[in-house]
Amino acid sequence: MEIYQKQSFKDSFKVYFDRRMLRILLLGAISGFPWVIIGSSLSLWLKEDGLSRSTIGWAGLIFAVYAFNYLWAPLIDRVRIPWLTNKVGHRRSWIIIMQLIILLSLIFWNFVDPTKNLALVISIGLIIAIASATQDITVDALRIEQIGKNEGKSMQAGAAIAVVGWWTGYKLGGVVALNSAEYFQKLGIDNYWQITFLILGIIIIACNIALMFVHEKKSSERYDAQSKTDKIIQKKLGSNNFLTPIIAWISGTIAGPIVSFFKKNGFKIALGILGFVFLFKIGEAFLGRMSIIFYKEIGFSKTDIAIYSKGLGWITTVVFTLLGGLFAIRSGVIKAMFVSGILMASTNLLFSLLAWSGKSEWLFAIAVIFDDMAAAFATVAFVAFISMLVDRTYTATQYALLASIGTAGRTTLAASSGAMVDWLNGDWGIFFIITAIMVIPSLVFLFFIKNKIKLSEK
């Protein structure tokens, strides 16, 4: 059950000026940027090198690692990076290592031709996805830990700012990627995408420098709680030999976060939450996976896409994410998710209209604005929802579990998006109608569990 109290609009907006929000903005940007690399940039690179829609769609299966990062999230919660953890902190040390892996992968891409060695291109993309998914575990934990346990309003505001940061990293990174590729292509450089990836690598370096300004609390509370769980398991094991502490540590690391989640919510409600999380953004994912291919096929250039989908889309997303955060603060996160779900379904239909009308810059702009508005509302409500469900003892693991279940629905099912367009014989209008219908099952789940979810919104 949601517990919240009405505030004036001015009082609600003040929470955005908390100093911690600037740190959360940066963390969001660090999290969103890799999606530019393995999302729109990789898709367009493969498209312009002559690969089919189906191949590009199936290549998107590399995003599936985001759906399974909860499998190694317990290790991120507990394993400390030698030397680096003591220097920069537990969370930040993991982020730095993952950023370094992404940077090296971009350099390797510079020497690969996808038409000659597609498997290697996808393999490197998979490495980037794994590093990014691992980074996300730590980024989300560090973001949540910036806010106190009982600061429900600040948590929702932080969710909005995190989304703004994510889209800032994704949209502005996309502007850099697309305009750089266009620039080098016009210069007559054959490997213009490979050079673009080196430029994106410079942004990775800048992100690492900026990360040093994000405060990380040196608290032993999490470690103490985890050790307490280990000792309880040791006692239950009965025997006392050199293997007992190891078995207890492994059991506590893996089972502790899951047991905590089901114990807090109850078995049936926990399953309902997982069902909702899995289904909520499937329609958006189908649209997103094929959108840049759709734009290209109806005649828009990379510069057009950069201006309307990335630049204009970023401004729209920032504005409506902040408004979405205020809506969630004032009306409650559950109501915000119902509203955003309906908005997502409705705005997908605008792309059907664009598909049937042909190339139209004003209709393209309208579709992008309303789609980004709906996505902003949906994402901030979703992030706030799962952020408020986690146990601080297992912040990284529980958030990763919920987020990756949501990603599982988006990536595994949306991988067939290109095949669906081909099956529809390129009828983009019908495709977008189908994506609109996809949101309905998740709202049914939410309706049945809405009064039994334990959230605190103070």
Image: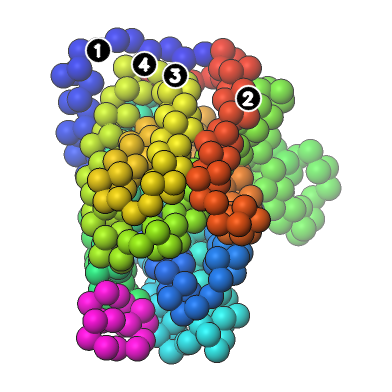
Q: Name the residue under label 2.
A: 445
Which quadrant would residue 52 be assigned to in this image? bottom right
Observer-side mark, 1 or 4, equals 4
- What's the CA distance linking mark 2 and mark 4? 20 Å
Residue 189 located within the stretch drawn in magenta: yes
Residue drawn at x 55%, y 44% as measured from the top left: 430
- What's the CA distance linking mark 2 and mark 3? 14 Å
Residue sticking out furthest to the front? 357
86 sits to left or right of 258: left
382 in relation to 22, above or below? above
- What's the CA distance linking mark 1 and mark 3? 17 Å
Kindly identify the amino acid type of the residue bearing the numbered disc 2: Phe
Q: Main secondary structure of the magenta part?
A: helix
- Going from N to C along the chain, the mark reached first, 1 or 3, is 1
Dot label at residue 335: 3
- What's the CA distance linking mark 1 and mark 4? 10 Å
Q: Which stretch did the figure color magenta?
A: 181-196
Residue 95 visible from this viewpoint:
no
- What's the CA distance linking mark 4 and mark 3? 6 Å
